[in-house]
Image (cartoon, rainbow, N blue to C red):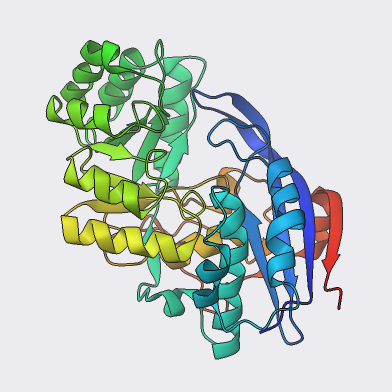
Amino acid sequence: MQIERVDLIQLKIPMTGHFETSYYRRYESDKLILKFYTPDHVAWTECVAGAIPGYSYETINTARVILKEHFLPLIIGRDLDGPEDFWPLFGRFRGHSMTKASVENALWIFKALEEDISLAKLLGNRKDRVISGVSIGIQDTSEDLVRLAAEYLEKGYPKIKMKIKPGTDLERVDAMRSAFPDIKLMVDANNAYSLEDLETLRELDRYNLLMIEQPLEYEDVHDHAKLQAMMQTPICLDESIQGPYFARLAAETSACRIINIKQGRVAGLAKAREIHDLCREAGIGVWCGGMFETGIGRALILALAGLDNFIYPSDISASDRYYHRDIVDPEFTLNPDGTIDVPRGPGLGVEVNEKVLEDYTVAREVIRFKP
């Protein structure tokens, strides 16, 4: 394959409602979409970096600069066999995992298109459906939280993840468990706590939670190991797992019992699959988290999330969870059994609706091969 051109397309998409974490509250989603061209195929990818350096130091603006000045010149016009060529070329660059993933993903998609198979099949995903779940941001009141959760449960979502932070934690969890004593419920702290909050964190053991996700610092493994030894509730690590080394470190120190694999966070599908395999060997179950992906990114993580050690419900929800109109056809919908279909067409298995894409576009730039 030889990539001749890449379009960088920035979107601003209104969300169906606000979403608040311990970082900030958002009402719209800023997205960077990449459209890669070879003589025979087009591949769409999505950089999951956000507008501000909250979840990660990466942002859409840093991604654009790194792509234009360093990453895309390295691959445009070069003869490539497939994703196996990515790390020999990009391994010398430090950081910028989300930006790397947006390029690495394209090589996987082109490989699938060349073989006329789905990305899911290329990755070894044999499942047609993935168990879904829904993430609920911090609400203004416990009543608002319970009401919103009831709406999603009524739609058929089998797992609820609720965001928490100091001051909106035990009361909210208690309200949810009182209203829904038997549902699969987990909490996500987005590194809002420290070991000084041990009393509050240990109180969460009373609520039969599926897991507590990333309660401590985003770079931490050591203190999570201390905390897990003092809690019954499984700890799930997210931000701390920046790559396979950190997954191995977490396993060897018993810092968690579950890991959330976000392929954008770990620099792409090859590293995500490596972490999946490492966790399987260590007896750590994994699940697939989301990053407010459009249908492009959603199709890609569905292809990943059917590997056999993804044993917990994902955060991959229907398109209408976040967006009034997604940018792909068909849009993703929730099945009656609480699952989302894995696309099985060639490549990503979905088509980008370029009219809808254009409606959301706020900037576009073309990067071409210069002989």
What residue sits 57% from the left and 68% below the top?
A: 89
What is the x, y in percent for residue 352? 71, 66
The residue most toward the front is 92
What is the x, y in percent for residue 133? 40, 47
- Nearest the camera: 263 or 312? 263
- Nearest the camera: 73 or 351? 73
What residue sits 53% from the left and 34% below the top?
A: 55
What residue sits 20% from the left and 32% below the top?
A: 225
- Nearest the camera: 232 or 61? 61
Which of the 4 image quadrants contains residue 196? top left
What is the x, y in percent for residue 146? 41, 25
What residue sits 15% from the left and 26% below the top?
A: 231
Image quadrant occupied by the N terminus: bottom right
Image quadrant occupied by the C terminus: bottom right
What is the x, y in percent for residue 213? 33, 34
Say if residue 85 shows up in the picture: yes
Say if residue 184 shows up in the picture: no
